[in-house]
Image (cartoon, rainbow, N blue to C red):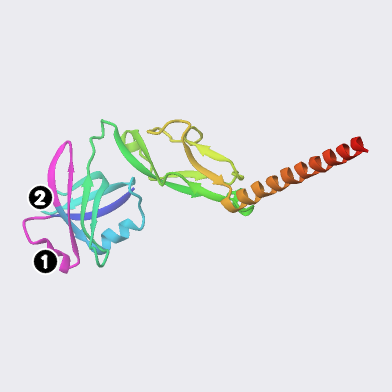
């Protein structure tokens, strides 16, 4: 589990903190009061490089009394519209005795043989909603596509979700290798040409038979 050091935040202008390289935030949950916090932008961006949106984070809160530690999930991140740097972050501290719903990112593993034959790997879901206890939520779901040929698919029921339950139908397609339209059109055109040749041959035979009967 990854750790982030934060400080309790008292009243103050958020923009002044941001100019000092500090990102304001808040942590909240069903079993606690909302607590304003702050952290260095460098530490926060370093954390973002290591986690996913469903990773559990150990939050260490200092300042204003005895230090606290709690497990949280990243809830909301606000970014500056111009610089794209984080300007505010929300963390969620769940009730560890109750299940929760969360979207878990998908990671594609391997290379589908069908793509080497001209197929296109079509990923239907970038995240999958799951339901389970907070401690059992995975940081990501790996989907191995190394056995997929053109026309093959991987469904929800074929994935190991561990102790959590997927909130999608068991037969829902997650990943498939599709045939490009150009290849489909080429195959269709080829079939049409074969049909046309067959019809021409039949017409020629009918003409010969008619001529023979007339003679």
**Of the image marks 2 and 1, the number of the one nearer the N terminus:** 1
In magenta, the rendered stretch is: 9-36
Q: Is residue 111 visible?
A: no
The one nearer the camera, 165 or 112, is 112
The one nearer the camera, 191 or 182, is 191
Query: Badge 2 is on which residue?
Result: 65
Q: Is residue 89 visible?
A: yes
Query: Badge 1 is on which residue?
Result: 16
In the rendered image, the quadrant that contains the C terminus is top right
User: Which residue is outermost to the front?
Assistant: 214
Percent from the top left, x then y, of residue 57? 29, 48
Which is closer to the viewer, label 2 or label 1?
1
Horizontal relation, residue 198 to residue 172: left or right: right
Local SS, label 1: helix
Horizontal relation, residue 7 to residue 103: left or right: left
Magenta-span inclusion, residue 14: yes
Percent from the top left, x then y, of residue 210? 86, 37
The one nearer the camera, 103 or 200, is 200
Is disc 1 surrounded by few (<14), some (14 to 19) or many (20+) residues within 10 Å?
few
Please report the residue visible at 18 percent of the width from the left and 47 percent of the height from the top: 27
């Amino acid at each position: 589990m990854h750790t982030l050091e934060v400080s309790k935040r008292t009243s103050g202008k958020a923009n002044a903190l941001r100019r000092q390289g500090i990102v304001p935030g808040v942590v909240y949950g069903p079993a606690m009061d909302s607590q304003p916090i702050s952290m260095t932008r460098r530490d926060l961006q370093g954390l973002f490089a290591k986690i996913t949106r469903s990773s559990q984070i150990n939050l260490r809160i200092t300042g204003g009394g005895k230090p606290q530690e709690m497990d949280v999930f990243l809830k909301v991140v606000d970014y500056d519209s111009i610089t794209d740097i984080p300007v505010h972050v929300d963390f969620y501290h769940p009730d560890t005795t109750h299940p929760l719903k969360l979207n878990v990112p998908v990671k594609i593993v391997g290379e589908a043989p069908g793509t080497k034959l001209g197929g296109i790997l079509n990923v239907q879901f970038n995240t999958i909603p799951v339901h389970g206890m907070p401690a059992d939520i995975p940081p990501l779901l790996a989907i191995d596509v190394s056995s997929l040929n053109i026309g093959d698919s991987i469904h929800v029921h074929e994935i190991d979700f561990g102790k959590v339950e997927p909130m999608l139908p068991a037969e829902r397609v997650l990943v498939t290798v599709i045939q490009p339209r150009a290849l489909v059109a080429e195959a269709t055109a080829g079939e049409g040409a074969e049909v046309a040749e067959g019809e021409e041959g039949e017409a020629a035979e009918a003409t010969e038979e008619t001529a023979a009967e007339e003679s």
